[in-house]
Amino acid sequence: MNLSEHFTLAELCFSSTAQRLGIDNVPPAEVIDRLSRLARGLEQIRALLGGYPLHIDSGYRCPKLNAAVRGAPKSAHMDGDAADFTCAQYGTPLQIVRAVQASGLAYDQIIQEGTWVHASFAPAMRGQVLTAHFDACGRVTYSDGC
C-alpha cells in the first residue's frame, strides 16, 4: 500500500528486530492515517535533499517492538508519527538536520541521533531541533540544537 509517491506502508512498518523476535508490527487502522502524514513529511524532506532516496531504518513500532529496541516509553514511533532514516547520497545526519532546520519545513522534531536522523511529524509541530548523546551504557540524553 502506497502512503505517498515514494513511501509504502510496508517500508514504514518494516523491522528486522520484529522479524527476528516474531513480533507482529502491523499498525492498527488509526495509526495508518498518521503514517500517511509521516510519509507526506518525509516526501518534503526527500525533495529538500535533492530527491535522493531516504533509507528508513525505523518507522512505526508497536509497543512490544518499541520495548524490544529500548525506545522511549512515549516514543512518537508508536503513534506512527516518526521515522529514523539516513540519506547517504545527500550527506551526514548533521548535514541533513541542518538542511531541514534551515528550510522552513514544518515538523515536530528533527534529531541528529548519531548515525541517523529522527524526524517526527506529531501534531504538536514544535519545530524542535535536538542532538542525541549516548553514554557508554547506551543511555541517551538530548541537547537543544545541532
Image: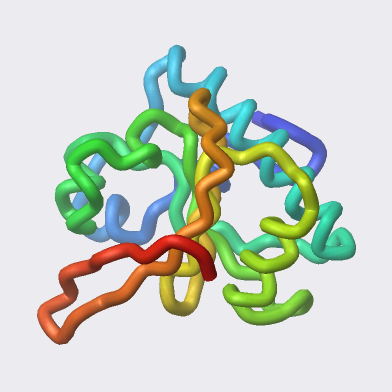
Looking at this view, name the residue that lies furthest to the bottom. 136
Q: Is residue 39 visible?
A: yes
Residue 24: x and y, percent?
A: 28, 37
Give the residue at x 18% y 75%: 138
From the top left corner, tell me how far across and down residue 2 is, in percent: 70, 32
Q: Which residue is more in the foreground, 142 or 75? A: 142
Examine the rendering and report whether any part of residue 57 can be seen: no
Where does the image place residue 91, in percent across and percent down from the top left? Answer: 71, 80
Q: Nearer the viewer, residue 61 or 139?
A: 139
Q: Is residue 119 left or right of residue 4?
A: left
**143 displayed left or right of 51:** left
Residue at 69% x, 38% y is 106
Expressed as whole percent of the image width and height from the top left, the position of residue 88 reads 68, 78
| Residue at 57% from the left image edge and 47% from the top image edge | 11
Which quadrant of the structure image shows residue 133?
bottom left
Q: Judge whether 107 appears above or below 79 on screen.
A: below
Q: Residue furthest front?
A: 144
Quarter of the image with the N terminus in it = top right
